[in-house]
Structure formats: structure tokens, C-alpha cells
Amino acid sequence: MNNSVLWYTTRGAGAVSLVLLSAVVVLGILSVLRVQTTGWPRFLTVGLHRNLALMTLVFLTLHIVTAVVDPFTHLGWLAAVVPFSSYYRTFWLGLGTIAFELLLAIVLTSLVRGFIGQAAWRLLHWLTYAAWPFAVLHGVGTGTDAWSAWLFTLQAFCVIAVLAAIGYRFMTGSRDPLADARSSFQGAVDRREPR
Amino acid sequence: MEPKDTPHARVRARDAGMRLLTRLTTGAAVSAVIGVGLFGAVSAYTIPGTATTSTITSSSSSTSTSAGLQSSTTPVTSSSSSGVAVSGGSR
Amino acid sequence: MSAPQLLAGPDPSRGSERRAEHVARLGPLPKGGHALIELLVRTGLTGRGGAGFPVGLKWRAVTTASHGSAVVIANGAEGEPHSRKDRLLMTSRPHLILDGAMLAAASVHAKQVVLYIGEEHHAAMRSMSGALTERTEHERRMVRIVAAPPRYVAGDSSATVHLVDAGIATPTTTPPSPRDRGVGGAATLVQNVETLAHVAVIARTGIATDTVLITVAGGVRAPGVFEVNVGTPLGDAVQLAGGASEPVRAVLVGGYFGQWVEPAEAWSLPLDPHALRARGLSLGCGVIGLVPASHCAVCEVAGIMRYLASESSAQCGPCFFGLRALADACTRIAERGTDPGDLQRLQRWSAEVQGRGACKHPDGVVMFLQSAMKTFGDDFAHHPAHIRRSA
């Protein structure tokens, strides 16, 4: 196979991974807000978040494998798992390795959430807020043409989308469709008032 | 047709939601695959010095040949050659 | 069937056994402590609240986590709709339960004992509080009665802790388990009242009890609570209840979080927690329910699903919405008849719910439904539309 193909696939898969990851983060934020309309039920946000997260891992794997297999990068498999061990753009690539491992940890712990318990899962999931910026910086630092128009636009769009979602989260309380049911059940089992 | 909150209306609403989820997921997957090819091709196009005539990307349809650029500085060979390890890009 | 152990003595229907008679019959209260815990481990006593966890191991864990200020909760909430055994014990043998609670407190170094009783179970309340007045001053100071709301999840261990601690009977996420951090942050032992009654007997005899309390309900002539030897065939217990009043469609073993069994297989099932677990079943809280053949199985299951879904504490989306989705799908089949998408819907929504709840309620419901779909597979696949029966 033509080696440029590997290289272009690496970059293409990297760009797609960034877009997918940003969508996953936005959906994650929206699911906390418990956004729901008649045409868009709550499980849709959560389900899409989950499906896209798995998809992100797939394309991320493609990105990493093509990068390592490419004879011209001389990256070696070690660089894919040990951060800051590559000779090539050591720092920026290392950020990517870290982002990948964080994401892997987050997805794996989500799959075994029953075993580790809700609190531990929640704590680990907060690592997403570390993984995403690392991924963005990795893209900025290792993309040869980081400042070329298309990649810049793409990255800007992703960053804006995530920042907008975070901003929205802070400004909106959650219109929680569960709130009514929860408070009515709680009222029924609340025994705090002295009889 | 029916009051909104009966079990039957809810079942239908959930079915619709599920179909939407499947459609969106499939759409995302297809877009992502196309995206790899698209961004790969754009990447090939925008990096000076790496446009080659023999590039065949998986889903892109455009191959650009720029006359006169030194494609010989980028060894396009599949044998393992050590040495110049500039893969596809100038800094 | 050999003599009952928990219900030995005066006829339970005669009401609360007085302290004097209790002591005359069984002897004084033994000492709790490390030796008792080891005895419980050796006898292999398992909990009777539904989970069937080894009692000795639980007490060991609480003792380790206790810093001298543990709490014991005697769980008599009996939220399972058809179960009657806890109430029977509380109304007729309150001192057995109090003995067990005191032994527990001494063994796990607890300074507080809570009797967790359903607020609508007035006879049980009266009996337990009456029995309390007959205890020593020291014991009376340690014990208080807390009334539990009549909800299914109010009997969950973490819900009992939450009610005692914060006044609201909703299950909480574990970890941390009540064993480590419960009431007021202290190690808390939550034990079913029947289990405590067994402890009270074991502490005196030094050997395992070999009986279990079973509630037989549904299509039998004389439903009620029966104390049977561990390992008694289920069919024998049904005979004690007067036998089936009509031909049986299926037997629910273990209550609403149990499993459905075909009658032919059910009659020979040993009523033994370990043996049942070995067959992939569970004794649970000891409820055996018979569904007559004249009842529509799908409609029965749909009704139970609606109940269980309505008993969600609405603390997490997967449980509240997911169980409602499953109940809706079952109701749809029951009322409108099966259509091709229905079985798929049930599979899909079960997968969405399983393992995603913040507590164990949704998982229990999913297992119940999966068992129903296996046992009543044909009924679910070819159910005709008919008006929902009230039975």
C-alpha cells in the first residue's frame, strides 16, 4: 500500500476522531441537563452519546494504528501507549497518547459500571474534561498543517461547540422530566416531620 | 389521536425515538468513514511537497499531481528504508 | 415434617408470646460476641430478607468496620406484597427477634438497635413495642422503633439506612455499603427479622436451625405462612396450604424478584436457599405464588410489571423510564395483542435498563421479566387482544 495513504488516513481518522469526541462531550453535557422534547426523548441523548463514544474509539484506533504502522513515522507501538516516548513531536504526541488512554479508561469503566459502583464511575467520567482538551492540543501540536484553513476551522468548530455546551450548562437549570416523579415519591416516603 | 400519556402512546413514542437513534448512529458512522477519506484527501492537497501522482486514498476520488514539485525528496517506497523519516510533512 | 423451631411454642395465632413464657421455653438470653459470630459462620446461616447473604460473614464485616458505635437495624418492613412471614414473627414471637437483635448488637459492638416496622402493620407494631416493655432497662434504652412507609423499595437495606439516618426511605447508591458507612456514618448491620429469630435459636442450641418460613400465596385453598424443614419439596409446602385450588399454570418462586417455574418442575424443588441457587433459582424472601391456569399469564405479568415500575423511587432515568417502558410494552401485549415488534421491544428495553440503575430495583425487575418471557414464551408470542382482567 502506498505509504502516503497511511499518512493521510492517520490524519483523516484523527480529524474525524476529534469531531466525534467533541460530539460525545456535547452529548454528555446535554444528557446531564436532561434535555428532552417530544421528538427527542432522553434515552436518545444518552444512547447517541454511548454509540458515538464507541465509534470514537474505533476511529481513534484506526488513527493510531495507521500512524504506528506507517514506516515513515518510525513511531513504534511504544509511543502509542507510553506518553512522551516518541522522538517525533514528543510533547504534542504524548498528549495524544494520554488522551487516548484516558478515553479508553472512561469507556472501559462505563462498560463495567455495575462492578465498580456509581460513585467510582462518576469520578472517572469527569476525566473526560481532561481527555478532550488533550486531544485538541494534540491535534494542534502534531498536525503538520495545523494552521491550514481546513483543520483550523474544524478544530475551532469543535472547541466552540464544546465551550457553548459548557456555557449552556452553567446558564440553564435542568428541566428534569424526572423531577416531578422523584419529588412525589420522596414526599410519599419522607418521614421527617414530627407526627 | 390518543391522549399523550397512555402506555400505548408512550410505546409508539419510544419506538420512534429508537428508530431515530439508529438512524443518527448509522448516519454518524457513514459520515465518519467518508470524513476519513475527505479529510485525508484535503490533507494531501494542502500539504506542500507531498502531493504524489500515485496516491490512491480509500474513499477520496481526487488525486492531485502538481507539476514541478520535488516529489523525489519524499521517498515513496514500501521497503523499509531507514534514514530520512520525514513522513508526509514539513514542519 | 419435624417440629418447627421459630414457631415452636404456643399457637402463633394466639398473639404475642410474653417474655416469661419465652424464657421458660427457651432459656435465658445467651451472650453475643466473637464466639457467636464464628458459630454463625460454621452453621452457614444465610439471610432471609431476600439476598441470602451469609450471616456470619456479614457480622464479621460490620464488626471490623465498627468502632464501638455500630447500629443494628432489624428489618421487618416486609415490602414484598404477598409475604406475611415477618409480620407473623413480629406478632407472635417478638422476643425471638429482640433476642436476635441484642445478640447482634453485642457481637458487632453496636450501641443502637432500630426496629424497622411497616407503618401500616399495626399488630406487628403493637406486639414489638409491647414486648419491648418487658425487656431490661439497658435494652430498652438501646432500642427504638422506626416506621417504614408501605413501599416496595422501603425494605431495601440502603433505604432502611436512609430512612433512619435522613428521614427518607429511598435506596441509595452503594458503595459505600451500609456495612461500612450507614446510619450517622457508622457501620450498620441490616438484618431481616426472621434471620434474627434464627440467630436467637442458634445461640442457644449451638447448632444450625434447619427450618425456613415460607409464605404460600395465590391459587391455594389456605394461603398462609408455614415453617418447613430446609429441603422440603415445594409441593409439600403447597399441600400444607391446602393444595392448589385449581390447576396451576406456573409457580413464582421467591416473590416479585424471583423466577417462574413450570408446575411439573416446581413440585419437587427443595425449599433450600443453597439448593435453589445451584439451580439458578432463589428462595428470596420465601414467597411461593401459584398462578391458576384460568388466569392469563401475560396479564398477570403485565400487572406485576406495572406495580414494580410504579414502585421505582424515580432517582434515575434508566429505572423510572426504563421500567415504565417495559411495563408499557407488557401492557400493550396484554391489551392489544402481540405484534411483531413487541418481543423486540422487550429485549431492547431490558438491555437498556440492566446494570444502569443507581440501585438494585431495576435489575430485579428485569430478571423477573426475563424469567416470565422464558416460561411464558408462547403466551407472549401469541397473545390475543382482550380486556385487561382485574385478577
Image: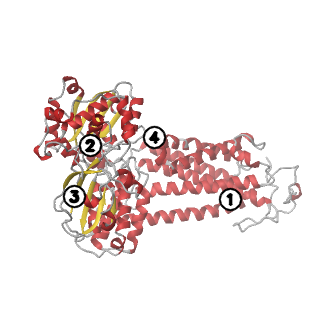
Mark in front: 1 vs 2: 2
Label drawn at residue A119: 4
Q: A161 and C231: which one is in front?
A: C231
In this rendering, the answer to whether C245 lies above or below C31 is below
The reply, left or right, for residue A110 in relation to residue C14 is right
Residue C338 percent across, percent down from the top left: 34, 73
* In contact (CB < 8 Å): disc 2 and disc 4: no
Q: Secondary structure at mark 2?
A: helix
Q: Give the Cα separation between the discs numbered 3 and 4.
A: 39 Å
- Pointer 3 residue: C217
- Pointer 1 residue: B39
Q: Quadrant of residue C27?
A: top left
Residue C214 percent across, percent down from the top left: 25, 52
* In contact (CB < 8 Å): disc 1 and disc 2: no
Residue at screen point 36% across, 49% down? A176
Q: Secondary structure at mark 3?
A: strand
